[in-house]
Amino acid sequence: MKGDLFSSDHMVGPASAPGMSVQNEKSIRYVVNGEMLARQGAMVAYRGDLQFERKGQGVGGMLKRVVTGEGLPLMAVRGQGEAWFAHQAQNCFIVEIEPGDEFTVDGRNVLCFDATLSYRIQTVKGAGITGGGLFNSVFSGHGRLGLTCAGSPLVIPVTPQQPLYVDTDAVVGWTARLHTSLHRSQTFGSMLRGGSGEVVQLKLEGEGYVVVRPSELSSQER
């Protein structure tokens, strides 16, 4: 069999190491030896002796998801083998989380992660309960986190001298030492005259990094 489809650009070779790695810009490969966790429905292929089990969030987690619209519909992947994960042909990236780190991320961008990581769902500080998508997942521990993004993300440094203002529908995540609040960029009079369409942003202050997608959420993603 010949053709560009069977070139080295697309052909999957032997795994170089256990754990998580980027297979290509649209998928993540995970060599499983024990247990890992992934977004439900994100597995596109696997081989070996693996079992996939829906992972419950408990009563408190389910109630929080109903109230906030946020949550991680997870599955546990156990056994020996390898699996490939992807979501809607979005671009895939890996974040290395070390002890003492915390990374806040929109749950809709989580693809898979090491079982050594823990996460909790919390309200974005300063955002109250207004505007959908302001309840994010905070990851900590030691391990790798696989993320998706619709397009190539912007990673923007934040310094104490220069806070950053981000559309709440475009932010993917941010590092732990940033403080958040809501910022209104239009006056009431401007809104009555039609406005610019950019009413409220998430303000991030301190020192760290913010990951932004190059588009706002579509109506299907909200």
Image (cartoon, rainbow, N blue to C red):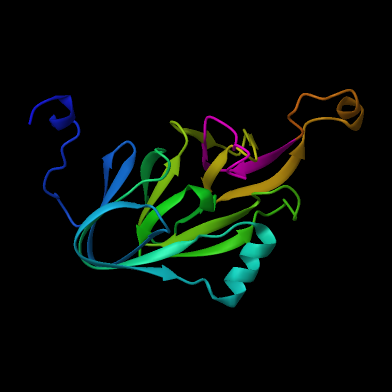
Q: Residue 10, how many percent across, how many down?
A: 19, 34
Between 121 and 62, which is closer to the camera in this rendering?
62
Question: Where on the picture, by quarter, is residue 197?
Answer: top right
Magenta highlight on residue 210? yes
Residue found at x 32% / y 36%? 25
Between 213 and 108, which is closer to the camera in this rendering?
108
Q: Residue 58, how many percent across, how many down?
A: 54, 76
Q: Quadrant of the N terminus?
A: top left
Drawn side of residue 213 relative to residue 80, left or right: right
Drawn side of residue 152 relative to residue 196, left or right: left
Residue found at x 57% / y 40%? 171
Q: Which contiguous range is marked in magenta? A: 200-222
Between 102 and 213, which is closer to the camera in this rendering?
213
Does 15 appear above or below 81?
A: above
Q: Quadrant of the C terminus?
A: top right
Residue found at x 59% / y 42%? 220
- In the orientation shown, which residue stands out farthest toward the bottom? 59
Does 47 appear above or below 3?
A: below
Magenta highlight on residue 207? yes
Numbered label tally = 0
Residue 95 showing in the rendered view: yes
Residue 117 showing in the rendered view: no
Residue found at x 64% / y 57%? 69
- In the orientation shown, which residue stands out farthest toward the left? 1
